[in-house]
């Protein structure tokens, strides 16, 4: 395949993926609002555009499926067929097959490896009026090759003016002649000469010339034309906005982000050197000038960093777009009535964060429907509406993105969680006695934990919630659960805006420097050796009537202490409800650091999230607080079991 054709194919895949996401959402809305003609027209145009582009590239299976779906949509918008759940389900099944065809095209360059006979037969049955609620029209002839079927009847002038002209199919005129297509429609209607129409189209930003020609030619009324032109003007504005954007490959943005990270490290190094020179040569005019230049460089670097980060930001709507379809299918499968509410879809987050949060959200929504929402009969007995609600909301709070998944179901049963935790050996009775209800609820995130009475293909294997916490911890996020019995549950996820550059607290232990992500730091306190107590052989600190377990980095990383110390600093760090006191010798500074991978040979270092380079040019390890907390817990459980 030539480079030009490959580029065209890639553009087709990107645009088609956007259309598929759009169609999934629009069909769910259409099912609740079947009389929405404008929505039907929008869906029809998207399907027609996909079919035309697929035909141009020679993807015959894709053309075959999309043409059948387009024929059904055409009958729906013309009123020859009624919008019913059965019809929507058939078209959604066709969309699923289209997704498989797209994946095949992406991997092999052809759509020949996906079987489409079954879905084609189902669509034929719908076309023949065999679906419930459909009329019994004669099905349109279906193509078996890449050729485009005969066009439907020409649209009215109002439709032609109001609608954007779809991409050309193989037998259409070239895209460059797009204005001619509308001109031909008008000429065929006996409105005006082809030359008049094209001349009017060239000036359609000025409504009087086009309006006068069409109205004088007695094609449509002036009022109808005004309404059509207003829609045309809105769509034209959107088109202009789209033309001001370009698509950039993610790897290029990643490369730019890495370069900015290196620039930030260089900036930190120069600021450190400049600060040292300013202290030792404060009266030197060149040093003062250097300080001013470094201050300007610091400002520009910060602005550049923010600008690059914004280029990687995308609305969380991209992540949430798949949930309406998923909730519809799952609720039908389980015989429940579920309404999905999405809030804050315009909230932006880094693409790397968006890529990681998709799977956890899927697990949480599936659990909310399966475990959280009661069957219809149980909801009626409890005096609740038969339709359950699952709500996903997103917002930005400071330097974090907060996502909440709520349901109005039965809520978490604390006693059942207690019994399951004891039966599985997850915690001891002594530990449970010391836990408050909120801490007990968060036990559902432990590996292998499940309160389901039976295993289904939806949930119950005890892996979903563990995956949720693991994926969220990987991007330095936190997850917590709150619930009220009989009223529902809320799971709160806090994520960083970006995972490439973070604020960190630099600490020193026996001349070794470590970085603790500032998002994990609660506070820092100064203590003496006498403040440290021992419970069951483990060091703890009584901090404001709370027993805080202590972690010595000298023990964790086998650092040989030079001498006994009487004074220490304890950095209280934690993820959610769990906290630990990290014992260090000295607090150095707060610094913006760039997280670097440890490489293939050092990826499995326990308790280390990555490395960075300080302003002094030294490599510093970044602590993984979540993993250190987990390690402390596992050691404690092993001691209890012994």
Image: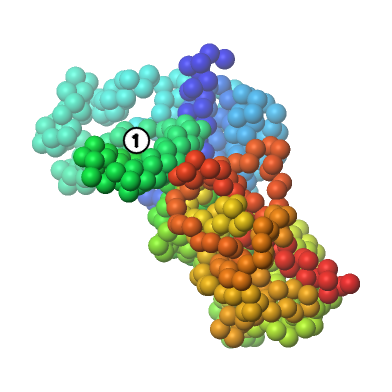
* Nearest to the observer: residue 562 or residue 380: 562
Residue 315 placement (x, y as % from top left):
43, 50
Q: Residue placed at 83% from the left, 74% from the top?
A: 640
Asked if residue 324 lies left or right of residue 232, the reply is right
Residue 313 placement (x, y as % from top left):
43, 46
* Nearest to the observer: residue 494 or residue 273: 273
What element does badge 1 sit on? loop
Q: Residue placed at 20% from the left, 35% from the top?
A: 219
Q: Which quadrant: the N terminus?
A: top right
Residue 340 visible within the image: no
Asked if residue 178 lies left or right of residue 413, the reply is left
Residue 398 placement (x, y as % from top left):
40, 62
Location of mark 1 (residue): 245
Q: Which quadrant: the C terminus?
A: bottom right
Q: Residue placed at 54% from the left, 58% from the top?
A: 507
Tell me the colour scheme of the image.
Answer: rainbow
């Amino acid at each position: 395949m030539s480079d030009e054709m490959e580029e065209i194919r890639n553009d087709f895949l990107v645009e088609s993926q956007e259309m598929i996401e759009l169609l999934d959402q629009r069909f769910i809305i259409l099912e609740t609002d079947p009389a929405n003609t404008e929505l039907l027209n929008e869906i029809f145009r998207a399907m027609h555009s996909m079919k035309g582009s697929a035909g141009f590239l020679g993807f015959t299976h894709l053309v075959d499926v999309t043409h059948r779906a387009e024929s059904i949509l055409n009958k729906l918008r013309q009123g020859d067929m009624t919008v019913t759940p059965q019809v929507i389900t058939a078209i959604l099944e066709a969309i699923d097959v289209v997704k498989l065809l797209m994946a095949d095209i992406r991997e092999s360059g052809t759509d020949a490896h996906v079987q489409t006979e079954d879905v084609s037969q189902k669509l034929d049955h719908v076309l023949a009026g065999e679906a419930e609620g459909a009329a019994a029209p004669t099905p349109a002839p279906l193509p078996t090759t890449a050729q485009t079927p005969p066009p439907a009847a020409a649209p009215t002038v109002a439709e032609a003016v109001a609608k954007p002209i779809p991409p050309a199919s193989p037998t259409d005129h070239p895209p460059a002649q797009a204005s001619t297509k509308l001109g031909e429609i008008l000429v065929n209607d006996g409105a005006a000469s082809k030359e008049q129409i094209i001349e009017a189209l060239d000036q359609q930003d000025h409504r009087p010339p086009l309006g006068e020609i069409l109205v004088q030619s007695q094609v449509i009324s002036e009022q109808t034309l005004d309404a059509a032109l207003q829609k045309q003007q809105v769509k034209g504005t959107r088109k202009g906005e789209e033309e001001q954007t370009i698509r950039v490959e993610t790897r290029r943005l990643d490369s730019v982000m890495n370069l900015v990270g290196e620039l930030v490290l260089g900036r930190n190094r120069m600021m450190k050197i400049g600060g040292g020179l300013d202290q030792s040569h404060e009266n030197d005019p060149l040093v003062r000038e250097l300080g001013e230049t470094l201050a300007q460089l610091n400002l520009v670097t910060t602005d550049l960093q923010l600008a690059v980060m914004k280029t990687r930001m995308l609305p969380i709507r991209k992540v949430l777009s798949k949930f309406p379809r998923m909730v519809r299918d799952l609720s039908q499968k389980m015989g429940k009535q579920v309404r999905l509410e999405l809030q804050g879809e315009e909230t932006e987050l880094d693409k790397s964060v968006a890529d990681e949060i998709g799977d956890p959200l899927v697990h949480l929504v599936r659990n909310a429907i399966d475990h959280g929402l009661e069957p219809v009969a149980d909801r009626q007995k409890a005096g609740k509406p038969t339709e359950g609600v699952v709500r996903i909301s997103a917002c930005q709070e400071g330097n974090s993105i907060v996502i909440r998944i709520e349901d109005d179901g039965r809520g978490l049963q604390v006693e059942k969680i207690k019994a399951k935790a004891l039966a599985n050996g997850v915690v001891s009775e002594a530990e449970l006695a010391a836990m408050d209800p909120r801490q007990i609820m968060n036990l559902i995130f432990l590996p292998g934990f499940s309160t389901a009475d039976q295993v289904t293909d939806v949930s119950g294997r005890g892996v979903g919630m563990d995956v949720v916490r693991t994926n969220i911890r990987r991007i330095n996020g936190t997850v917590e659960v709150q619930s009220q019995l009989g009223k529902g549950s809320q799971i709160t996820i806090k994520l960083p805006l970006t995972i490439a550059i973070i604020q960190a607290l630099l600490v020193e232990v026996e001349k070794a420097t470590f970085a603790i992500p500032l998002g994990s730091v609660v506070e820092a306190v100064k203590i003496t050796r006498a403040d440290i107590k021992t419970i069951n052989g483990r060091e703890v600190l009584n901090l404001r009537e709370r027993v805080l377990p202590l972690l010595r980095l000298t023990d964790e990383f086998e650092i040989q202490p030079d001498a006994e110390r009487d004074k220490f600093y304890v950095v209280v760090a934690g993820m959610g409800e769990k906290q630990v006191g990290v014992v260090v010798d000295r607090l150095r500074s707060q610094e913006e650091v760039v997280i670097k991978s440890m490489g293939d040979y050092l990826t499995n270092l326990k308790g280390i999230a990555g490395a960075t380079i300080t302003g002094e040019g030294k490599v510093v390890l970044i602590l993984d607080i979540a993993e250190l907390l987990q390690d402390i817990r596992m050691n404690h459980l092993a001691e209890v079991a012994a």
